Image (cartoon, rainbow, N blue to C red):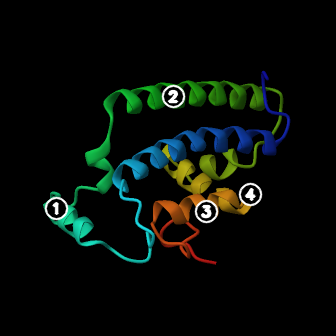
Amino acid sequence: MEYYTTSLQHIQAEIERIDLIIKRQVQLTREVQKSNCEFQGLSNSEQEIDALLKLLICLPLWASALSPSFYTKVRIAFDRMAVDIGKCKTESTIQGITLCLNEPARLFHLTPFDVDTILICLAPTLDMRYERLYAYFQDHLTKKRPIGLRR
């Protein structure tokens, strides 16, 4: 595809890029939650509490499970997708096609991080499978939206 003919095509491409972040986070979450507790998400084992106490203050759980080679591969794929999306967005603009996600980014001077945050929050509205993934990341069945967002 040389350019997006609709905003939906653009958003789908961006969500596909966000999926790489989610896949990486699933891998990291699995590393952190190696124990296969029957009540995962509902209770904390003594071993889990001891492991939490050993971590440095303000060090996220996933930071200790990072695999440099895995992170590098995901980063390269993510950056490649971002470049391809950028080219398609530029060509869409040249073709006179307005992409609805670009407008708020342009009007409010949003950074790529800001746009990614919007996409992460938008994903469960577009596809309910993200609700289950977000609940998994938060280790709680009822937390189906990114932290702080509730229906």
Q: Are marks 4 and 1 in contact (CB under 8 Å)?
A: no
Q: Earlier in the sequence, mark 1 or mark 3?
A: 1
Q: Is residue 48 visible?
A: yes
Q: Amino acid at mark 2?
A: Asp
Rendering coords of residue 126 (x, y %) = 74, 57
Q: Is residue 134 above or below residue 14?
A: below
Of the numbered discs in the image, which one, if any, rests on residue 57? 1
| Residue at x-position 40% and y-position 31% | 70
Q: Is residue 93 left or right of residue 70?
A: right
Residue linked to disc 4? 126
Q: Amino acid at mark 3?
A: Arg
Helix, strand or loop under label 1:
loop
What is the CA distance from the residue labelled 3 to the residue labelled 4?
13 Å
Residue linked to disc 3? 132
Q: Nearer the viewer, residue 21 or 2?
A: 21
Of the numbered discs in the image, which one, if any, rests on residue 79? 2
Q: Earlier in the sequence, mark 4 or mark 2?
A: 2
Q: Nearer the viewer, residue 138 or 32?
A: 32
Q: Amino acid at mark 4?
A: Leu
Camera-side mark, 2 or 3 = 3
Camera-side mark, 3 or 4 = 3
Helix, strand or loop under label 4:
helix
Q: Is residue 95 above or below residue 20?
A: above
Rendering coords of residue 93 (x, y %) = 75, 32
Rendering coords of residue 62 (x, y %) = 33, 51
Rendering coords of residue 80 (x, y %) = 55, 24
